Amino acid sequence: MGKVILNGEMMERSEAVIDMEDRGYQFGDGVYEVIRVYDGNLFTGEEHIERLFASAGKIKLDIPFSRDKVLSLARQLVKENGVKLGTVYMQVTRGTASRSHIFPDPSRTKGVFSAYTTEAPRPEKALENGVAAITEDDIRWLRCDIKSLNLLPNVLAKQEASGQGCYEAILHRSGTITEGSSSNVYIVKDGTVITHPATNLILNGITRQVTLKLCAENNIPFSEKEYSLEELRQADEVFLTSTTSEIMPIVKVDGRQVGEGIPGPVTRKLQLLFQEELNK
């Protein structure tokens, strides 16, 4: 089962015990991150941990360790479990307290930090051929910029996509595309990459940040602006990004072919640039 970390202590997973009144369990009162591991190394580890602390700050949650300590714990866990290609999942909750909506007294309750690793191969076939997606109403709350444990709307959308044999659900609010159920979503029109701006309505994905950096560095036009469901349907290319999906072409939306029905040239170029980024 491998080793896990609970409140800074490395232990066997079977030994890790979290109280029934942990606020993450009862309220979803916590935040999380998933960091990709390539060749035994954390990819954009510092950026993920910075976002973890940013999310925690937005819900007034104190993380019981420094940024450097969290990064060190993640690296120790990867090494201890011998992970070469996989992920590190970490989360922080507000801790254990008698069930009440009001925050517990921070002098009596400490945040609970936990982390574990998984082996996770790259989705190479999907990256090569592209995937299908559906569109769904975005019924989430209005602080999607916080990577919180409250993911039930995302789960329902992803399950609907899976039930229709699709990889992802693309979410929209009254016809304006926001993001995917577990990804950021982009269209390409006349060579320009377009994605929703990093407002409270989306999570500013770390892979999203890498992708836009690659666009800027390689003279690929891009625009962070709102776009519509109709513009999605008329796009030359569509793709998504996430920690585990990397830069994933979408070749079909709601049963309709995107462009020529194969990954487009801009998406392919970004995939190659992303691979170069991994090899640095």
Image: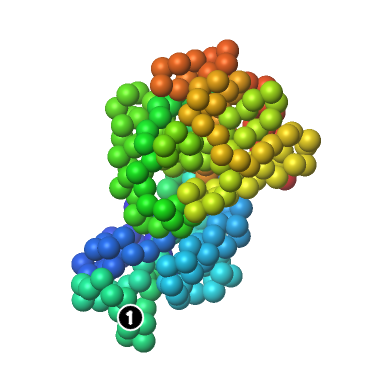
Residue 10, position in %: x, y?
41, 67
Pick whichever, 41 or 99, lies toward us. 99
Going 32% across and 83% down the picture, which residue do you hit? 105
Question: Left or right of 36: which side holds 5?
Answer: left
Please determine whether, in this image, residue 74 is positioned above or below residue 186.
below
Question: Left or right of 275: which side holds 168?
Answer: left
Q: Residue furthest top?
A: 260
Pick whichever, 136 or 228, lies toward us. 228
Can residue 84 be seen in this snapshot? Answer: no
Q: Residue furthest front?
A: 174
Q: What kind of element bears circle 1?
A: loop
**For the C terminus, which image quadrant?**
top right
Going 41% across and 37% down the picture, which residue do you hit? 174
Residue 211, position in %: x, y?
65, 41
Q: How is the image coloured?
A: rainbow
Can residue 266 be seen in this snapshot? Answer: yes
Disc tally is 1
Going 56% across and 39% down the picture, which residue do you hit? 226
Residue 124, position in %: x, y?
53, 28
Question: Left or right of 224: which side holds 253?
Answer: left
Pick whichever, 254 or 164, lies toward us. 254
Please determine whether, in this image, residue 84 is positioned above or below residue 28.
above
**Picture quadrant of residue 29:** bottom left
Please give the residue where the numbered disc 1 appears in the rendered image.
Answer: 109
**Picture quadrant of residue 6:** bottom left
The amino acid beneath tag 1 is Thr
Going 49% across and 15% down the picture, which residue do you hit? 257
Pick whichever, 70 or 29, lies toward us. 29
Question: Left or right of 112: which side holds 53?
Answer: right
Residue 154, position in %: x, y?
36, 43
